[in-house]
Amino acid sequence: VREIIETRGCDIVIADDGLQHYALARDIEIVVVDGHRGVGNGACLPAGPLREPISRLKEVDWVISNGRASGLHAEESLMKVLPLRFVSVSDAARTTLSCDEFVSRHTNVNALSGVGNPVRFAQTLRELRINPLLHALDDHHRFDGTELRFDNDWPVVCTEKDAVKIAESISSWTEIEREVWYLEIDVELEANAEQRLEALLCEHGIGVR
């Protein structure tokens, strides 16, 4: 961060997944929780899924719940995923299809997901009226091409995060002959979210144009 400030002259540094990195001083802490999955058994590692106790949420500046209200914080904001379109990974031209166009062509797909919560990705596809055969991978999975081999002729749909890794190597996987797509998404926060963020920034002397 010091190097970034010295060489880039920036005003804001965003550290993704940096809540536990206490060596890094921070002005604003924002926690995103999974409204559907919650906090599991509520215990910290290794007895549970948490890296810090639930009480830590009382110390942060903003809690955002993804999907639905988690009930973990009285003033949490809601965020929801907005599917935008499907983008081809196997096509060098990066062909795109609207969600409706994709659904009209493909009812069944092999869903690959190497993210923290693969089930949520599958649920997003179901909400689009797609039947996903979910192949859940470890978070940050490294692809070698074998993941794209199936006993059916359905296309593969993955997350945008996974698509980056697949695209880097797919040209060398000559034995893979099937369509591979990723679902491009956006997120939508509650109407007052922008004002809330501006207020947090202004509290620390950062003006918003």
Image (cartoon, rainbow, N blue to C red):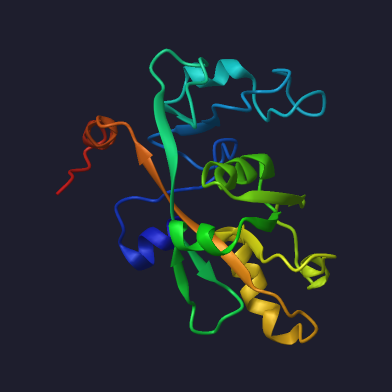
The image position of residue 11, as x and y in percent, is 29, 52
Count the marks: how many? 0
Residue at 18%, 45% (x, y): give it: 208
Asked which quadrant contains residue 188, the reply is top left
The furthest residue to the left:
209
Residue at 38%, 17% (x, y): give it: 75
Residue in the foreground of this view, choosing between 107 and 204? 107
Residue in the foreground of this view, choosing between 62 and 28? 62
The image position of residue 104, as x and y in percent, is 51, 60
Seen in the image, is 107 located left or right of residue 8?
Answer: right
Above or below: residue 185 compared with residue 147? above
Residue at 52%, 16% (x, y): give it: 72
Residue at 57%, 15% (x, y): give it: 55
Above or below: residue 83 compared with residue 148? above
Seen in the image, is 160 located left or right of residue 40?
Answer: left
Seen in the image, is 190 located left or right of residue 182?
Answer: left
Seen in the image, is 104 located left or right of residue 46?
Answer: left
Above or below: residue 51 compared with residue 14? above
The image position of residue 53, as x and y in percent, is 64, 20
The image position of residue 48, as x and y in percent, is 77, 25
Asked which quadrant contains residue 195, the reply is top left
